[in-house]
Amino acid sequence: MFAKAWEKHDSAALLFEKGFLDDAISRAYYAVFHGVAVLLRDKNVRLAVHKHVYILTQFQKEFIMSGLIKQDTFKTIIAIKTRREIADYSFESQPSVNDVRLIIEDARSCLAEFEAYIAGRALPPLRKPGNTA
């Protein structure tokens, strides 16, 4: 379910290792953004509008206000989004190595929480066809 989100996270880590700090921030944000989209699709929230504000507002409504995901997680997502906007659009963006490391760790924590939410309410896996065990 979260393959694309983890792919973005892994690319953030690789960009970080190579010293591409602004790009690492951007990929870390998109890791979380794709994770949010997975959760919303799982709740059958229509994502016809791909505006980030719309999707994050729907996430807040469905998961934060209902207490399914922690309020601090939403604050972290918004902080990563803000850093991404600076990294992508500011000519003066100069994030520190430590700041970027923390952003990537925060993205990992968000994805882990999203997966834990899904796992905590998931049904047992179905048997594969032909599997008699």
Image (tube, rainbow, N blue to C red):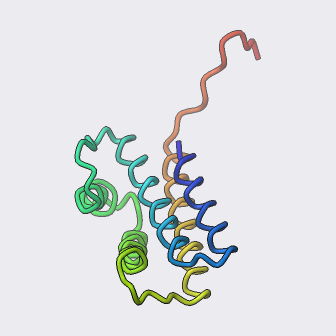
Give the quadrant of residue 72.
bottom left
Look at 56% across and 81% down and name the residue there.
100
* Number of residue marks: 0
Q: Is residue 62 left or right of residue 19?
A: left
**Viewer-nearest residue: 19 or 5:** 19
Going 57% across and 46% down the picture, which residue do you hit? Answer: 3
- Outermost top residue: 130
Relative to 5, 130 lies left or right:
right
Residue 127 or 35: which is nearer the viewer? 35
**Residue 41 position in % (x across, y down):** 36, 41
Q: Position of residue 113 (x, y in %)?
A: 52, 60
The percent coordinates of residue 122 (x first, y second) are 52, 39
- Quarter of the figure that contains the C terminus: top right
Q: Looking at the image, which is closer to me, 72 or 5?
A: 5
Kindly indicate the quadrant of the structure image that contains residue 101: bottom right
Q: Where in the figure is residue 85, as x and y percent of width and height?
A: 36, 75
Q: Which residue is drawn at 23% across and 47% down?
A: 49
Which quadrant of the view contains residue 53?
Answer: bottom left
Q: In this view, does 71 lie above or below 96?
A: above
Q: Which of 18 and 49 is in front in this view?
A: 18
Residue furthest out toward the front:
91
Residue appearing at x 39%, y 50% in the figure: 37
